[in-house]
């Protein structure tokens, strides 16, 4: 379970305190096992900053972040990596281009474990296990384990990145607009894969998205942020009954002079 208690984050722009950017303003949030939460909001609302605080990229100025009752508020990013899986918007960020798919998966499988030479993980049995893991993706990647990751398309790499992020079953999964750089057909396939993996693994998942249809369709809960605060939190039947126009109207009431999310 992830518990966020009243976190604040301010960024110093220059030497004038009046120009400081107060991005998070007392955010409280709880994610339980099996929660798949879509996080929406305008640019600058604090979505990615919130993910970065959870991941350890930023340290909150105030408040606490607890992961399964473990205080990780100030835990260095490399120490919390064993607990957190993350997929970024750029498909190139989650894999190493110049080594094989097999080697990428082997490295991911060792996350959080006592490190040993990578060659120990490059066994025939491991290759067969990865082949079975890749088959359900329906991308034919199980027959390309020895191909370098740089030879794969963006959608293939993002699918592999998602698999890698959940391979060692992290305690929470963070998805940072992970389909935004993909074409619509590929994005749909990656979202369907995401939904299946999250449902099967029951890993608490927080997904930042600008796609309101995906935010409504996937997951059991939807959260909207505005000006560094959570302003809407809906789940269950109420979420299931939402339509894109409902979110458009809510955005319009908050940001009448701003572009709405598409």
Image (cartoon, grey):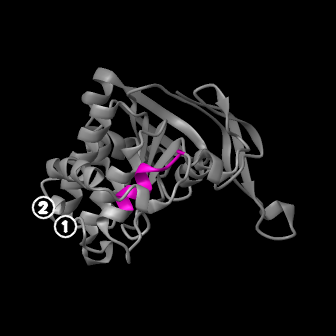
* Front residue of 248 and 155: 155
Report the front residue among 187 and 68: 68
Does the stretch in magenta take in 45? no
222 sits left or right of 16 in the view: left
Residue 18 vs 147, above or below: the answer is above
Q: Quick check: marks 1 and 2 in contact, CB under 8 Å?
A: yes
- Quarter-of-image position of residue 159: bottom left
- For the C terminus, the image quarter is bottom left
Q: Which residue is mark 2?
A: 140
- Occupied quadrant, residue 168: top left
User: Can residue 176 be seen at all in this image of the molecule?
Assistant: no
Left or right side of 109 for 184: left
Q: Residue at x 64, y 56 (%)?
A: 57
Most foreground residue, 158 or 47: 158
Give the CA distance from mark 1 to mark 2.
7 Å
Disc 2: CA contacts within 10 A as few (<14), some (14-19) or many (>=20): few
In percent of the image, x 35 and y 42: which residue is there? 247
Disc number for residue 144: 1
Where is residue 188? Give x, y as percent.
20, 54
Q: Point out residue 181 in the picture as x, y percentages from the top left corner.
A: 33, 67
Dot in front, 1 or 2? 1
**The magenta segment:** 104-113
Q: Residue at x 33, y 33 (%)?
A: 201
Q: Compared with residue 22, is residue 90 higher up or lower down, i.e. above or below?
A: below
Q: Residue 50 placed where, x, y %? A: 58, 47
Looking at the picture, how far across and down is residue 32, in whole percent?
A: 47, 25
């Amino acid at each position: 379970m992830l518990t966020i208690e009243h976190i604040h984050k301010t960024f110093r722009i220059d030497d004038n305190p009046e120009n400081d950017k107060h991005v998070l303003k007392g955010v409280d949030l709880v994610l339980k096992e099996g929660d798949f939460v879509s996080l929406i909001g305008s640019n600058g609302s604090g979505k990615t900053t919130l993910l970065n605080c959870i991941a350890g990229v930023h340290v909150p100025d105030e408040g606490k972040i607890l992961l399964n009752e473990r205080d990780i508020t100030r835990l260095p990013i490399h120490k919390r990596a064993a607990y957190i899986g993350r997929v970024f918007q750029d498909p190139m960020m989650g894999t190493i281009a110049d080594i094989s798919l097999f080697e990428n998966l082997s490295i991911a499988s060792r996350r959080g474990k006592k490190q040993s030479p990578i060659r120990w993980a490059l066994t025939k049995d491991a290759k067969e296990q990865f082949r079975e893991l890749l088959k359900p993706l329906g991308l034919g990647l199980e027959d390309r384990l020895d191909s370098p990751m740089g030879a794969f398309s963006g959608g293939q790499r993002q699918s592999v990145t998602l698999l890698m992020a959940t391979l060692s079953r992290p305690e929470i999964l963070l998805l940072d607009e992970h389909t935004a750089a993909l074409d619509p057909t590929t994005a749909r396939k990656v979202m369907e894969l995401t939904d299946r993996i999250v449902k099967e693994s029951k890993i608490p998942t927080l997904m930042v998205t600008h796609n309101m249809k995906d935010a409504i369709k996937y997951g059991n809960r939807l959260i909207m942020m505005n000006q560094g605060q959570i302003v809407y939190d809906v789940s269950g039947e109420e979420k299931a009954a939402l339509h894109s126009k409902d979110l458009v109207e809510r955005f319009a009431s908050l940001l009448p002079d701003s572009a709405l999310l598409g």
